[in-house]
Amino acid sequence: MSTQTVSSLDLLVPLDGSPLAEQALPLARMLAALAPTSIHLLRVISPTVVSSLVRHEAALLSAAGDTLGDRDEQMDAMREVLETEAESYLNQLVGPLAAIARDVDYEVAFGTPAEQIVAAASRHSDSLIVMATHGKGGLLRWALGSVTTRVLQSSAHPVLVARGARPGVSAAATPALRRIMVSLDGSLTAERALPLATGLARAAHADMLLAQVIDPVDAPIATLTADEATGRLRELAFGYLDHIAEQITRDVGRHVTTTVPVGHVAEEIVDEAGRKHIDLIVLGRHGLGGALPAFLGGTAEKVIQASTVPLLVAG
């Protein structure tokens, strides 16, 4: 296991124009305070949105006794209108971000949101995608919950996800990064999230907590009772985590603690994050069992849905 020094950051922040989607921006500001940072803002306009607006316009004109004219021309005109609106929106966000970031730019793309986000990230090899989920808006916006899932499934880049605050609940202007929890499962693939996690901890002078959730044994095994077998699994997990913690402590220079809760993985991750006042949960992209879609359909999505703590999927 190796650590990583975060000497610079390259953030891609997809936005759909909604206040909930903009709750990714505090996370971007938090990261920009840790290292020289470039921020790329992305607004994606879906073809279905363009078509829907043109149909609505045609219906209104028809009701008024008029006709829309050539459909292709109207589609082009609508795209121009939406592109101008999107550029104006993104340009308003550049100024405040430019005060804390090394470089800020923006892009408007047409296409399927998840595909365009993944494509934009691929143009920058070190991109870290920062997005809020459940940012649902009106006709001009896309549902970030489903988009986030598709991005996590399709992109090889790290993805930092914040669950949008409920209506009427204000998000922190700039969240703190004091305690980071990395959830492991004993696999090398899950450990691939450790370099980025340790790099962020080093840059933020944050404490780290390594966690491994153990399923309770519900029947005797050989000469051990169910409770004794569960206890033995916890001992083995603590040994594994303590070994990694020693390496991180030596390399990063900060004490690393460990915990082995027993129960359902996603529930225990969320509960432990609450008990330990965690500011960021980190999961390995291929860790915690099985293929990527199954993993995301279970642990990561449940953690995002149940916890207000931002989740970083990396590795």
Image: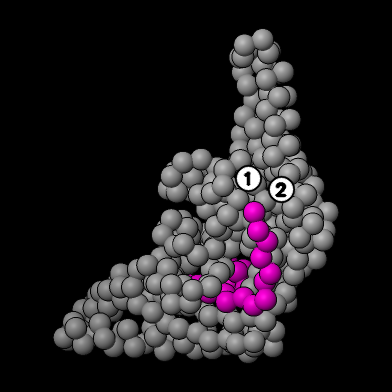
- The image quarter containing residue 215 is top right
Inspect the image, locate mark 2, and give the three-letter code of the amino acid beneath it: Ile
Q: Quadrant of residue 142?
A: bottom left
Q: Is residue 213 above or below residue 147?
A: above
| Residue 15 in magenta stretch | yes
Above or below, comparing residue 95 to residue 23 in the picture: below
Residue 177 x/y as whole percent: 75, 64
Residue placed farthest to the left in the image?
A: 70
Q: Judge whether residue 274 is colored magenta.
A: no
Residue 204 seen anywhere in this rendered image of the structure = yes
Q: Is residue 74 above or below residue 311?
A: below
Q: Nearer the viewer, residue 31 or 65?
A: 31
Q: Residue furthest top?
A: 223
Q: How is the model colour-coded?
A: one colour
Asked if one can make out residue 113 in the rendered structure from this viewpoint, the answer is: no
Q: Left or right: 277 with respect to 167?
A: right
Disc 2 versus disc 1: distance between alpha carbons? 10 Å
Marks 2/1 in contact by CB < 8 Å: the verdict is yes
- The residue under the point 67% across, 81% down is 36
Rendered view: 249 above or below 46: above
Q: 111 and 39: which one is in front?
A: 39
Point out residue 131 in the picture as x, y percentages from the top left corner. 55, 66
Q: Quadrant of residue 187?
A: top right
> Which numbered dot is residue 184?
1
- On the image, the x and y values in percent for residue 228 come to 72, 18
* Residue 244: mark in rendering: 2
Check disc 2: other Cα within 10 Å, few if <14, some if 14-19, many if 20+. Answer: some
Q: Is residue 129 left or right of residue 26?
A: left
> Which x, y percent locates residue 272?
73, 43
Front disc: 2 or 1? 2
Residue visible at 52% across and 79% down in the picture: 41
- Is disc 2 placed on a helix, strand or loop? helix
